[in-house]
């Protein structure tokens, strides 16, 4: 059911907000204060997304209203927002807001194998971590400050210090994620799930059968399906469809593309079939969904 692809972009894709440079910094990381960039945009960052980049936003003080894939949430001082790639996000900060934004290339996660890397690579939805008073919060805040200072300077052993602090920061933040240690899947299972997530991200609009993904993972389709059900509670096909549905919602919220073009962009040869698919995913037809959720 593959159809022709439209060339209309769904929403701005930046390496960093407002920047379209071909590469991230050579050391795989970028760090800046919230105030440094948002002040230039009157404290408002329009919805956009990143490809191949993972962001950690620490709001040290002030408040922020954040839009995440069409949903609104409020952040306050002492919270950290973890943003995986492709999540559409925009911010409206209070003028007294400050903190840090660290942007990592996904290649950095390869250095975290075998424990933490796959779990971070498999993240496909944003997470808000609330820092409670105590030693853990202090460790996280010190890590953000140290990374910012090291990034701004070119002192001896800068890269080594930054890498050590980044690993420390990711470990501390991972302990604030919802899953408990005894609920973590096996290492091999996490690796398969992380790789499956990467394959979905690269191929969800191609409408490939489940066997395509299983073949690339060197496991059977039945094994892949069982693995997904065990680790996520959803079938492998449901995860693929969820990613397609998410992209469809992004198109409908953030662009003016006709439903037929959205259907084409997601590999549907028949707009009517796309409409049925979308209604199963959301409970609404595409036009009704757009009318209800499109920003004013």
Image (tube, helix red, strand yellow):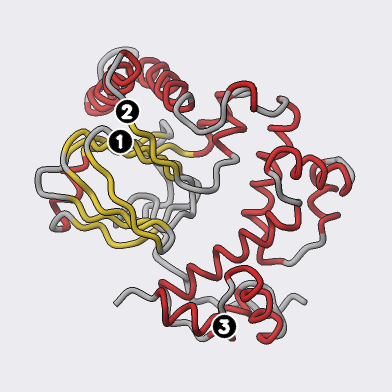
- Tag 1 secondary structure: strand
Give the farthest residue toward the front.
Answer: 283
Question: Residue at point 49% right, 49% down?
Answer: 85
Kindly identify which residue carries mark 2: 131
Question: Are circles 1 and 3 on residues that touch, CB within 8 Å?
Answer: no
- Tag 2 secondary structure: loop
Residue 84 placement (x, y as % from top left): 48, 45
Q: Which mark is residue 79?
A: 1
Asked if 152 appears above or below 12 in the picture, the reply is: above
User: Viewed as shown, does residue 140 lie left or right of 44?
Assistant: right
Q: Earlier in the sequence, mark 1 or mark 2?
A: 1
Where residue 33 sits, quadrant-wise, is top left
Question: Are circles 3 and 2 on residues that touch, CB within 8 Å?
Answer: no
Question: Are circles 1 and 2 on residues that touch, CB within 8 Å?
Answer: yes
**Residue 69 or residue 36, whichever sits in front:** 69
User: Viewed as shown, does residue 230 lie left or right of 35?
Assistant: right
How many other residues sit within 10 Å of disc 2, few (<14), some (14-19) or many (≥20)? some
Residue 55 placement (x, y as % from top left): 40, 41
**CA–CA distance between discs 1 and 2?**
6 Å
Residue 214 placement (x, y as % from top left): 83, 48
Where residue 6 sits, quadrant-wise, is bottom right
Asked if 99 appears above or below 141 in the picture, the reply is: below
Quadrant in which the N terminus is drawn:
bottom right
**CA–CA distance between discs 3 and 2?**
43 Å
How many other residues sit within 10 Å of disc 1, few (<14), some (14-19) or many (≥20)? many
Give the farthest residue toward the left.
Answer: 96
Kindly identify which residue carries mark 3: 261
Q: Earlier in the sequence, mark 1 or mark 3?
A: 1
């Amino acid at each position: 059911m593959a159809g022709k692809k439209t060339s209309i972009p769904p929403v701005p894709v930046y390496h960093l907000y407002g920047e379209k440079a071909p590469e991230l910094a050579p050391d795989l990381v970028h760090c800046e204060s919230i105030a440094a960039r948002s002040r230039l945009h009157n404290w408002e960052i329009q919805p956009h997304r990143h490809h191949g980049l993972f962001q950690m936003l620490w709001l040290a003080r002030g408040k922020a209203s954040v839009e995440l894939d069409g949903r609104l949430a409020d952040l306050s001082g002492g919270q950290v927002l973890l943003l995986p790639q492709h999540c559409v996000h925009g911010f409206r900060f209070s003028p007294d807001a400050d903190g840090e934004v660290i942007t990592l290339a996904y290649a950095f996660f390869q250095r975290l194998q075998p424990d933490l890397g796959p779990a971070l690579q498999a993240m496909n939805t944003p997470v808000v971590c609330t820092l409670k008073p105590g030693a853990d919060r202090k460790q996280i805040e010190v890590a953000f400050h140290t990374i910012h200072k090291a990034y701004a300077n070119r002192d001896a052993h800068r890269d080594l210090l930054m890498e050590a602090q980044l690993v420390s920061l990711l470990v501390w933040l991972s302990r604030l994620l919802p899953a408990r240690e005894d609920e973590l899947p096996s290492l091999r299972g996490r690796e398969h799930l992380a790789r499956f997530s990467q394959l979905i991200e690269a191929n969800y609009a191609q409408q490939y059968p489940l066997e395509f993904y299983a073949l690339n993972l060197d496991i059977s389709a039945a094994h892949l399906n069982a693995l997904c059900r065990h680790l996520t509670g959803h079938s492998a096909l449901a995860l693929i469809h969820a990613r397609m549905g998410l992209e469809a919602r992004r198109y409908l919220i953030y662009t003016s593309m006709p439903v037929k073009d959205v259907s084409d962009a997601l590999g549907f040869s028949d707009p009517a079939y796309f409409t049925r698919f979308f209604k199963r995913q959301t409970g609404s037809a595409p036009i009704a969904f757009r009318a209800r959720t499109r920003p004013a």
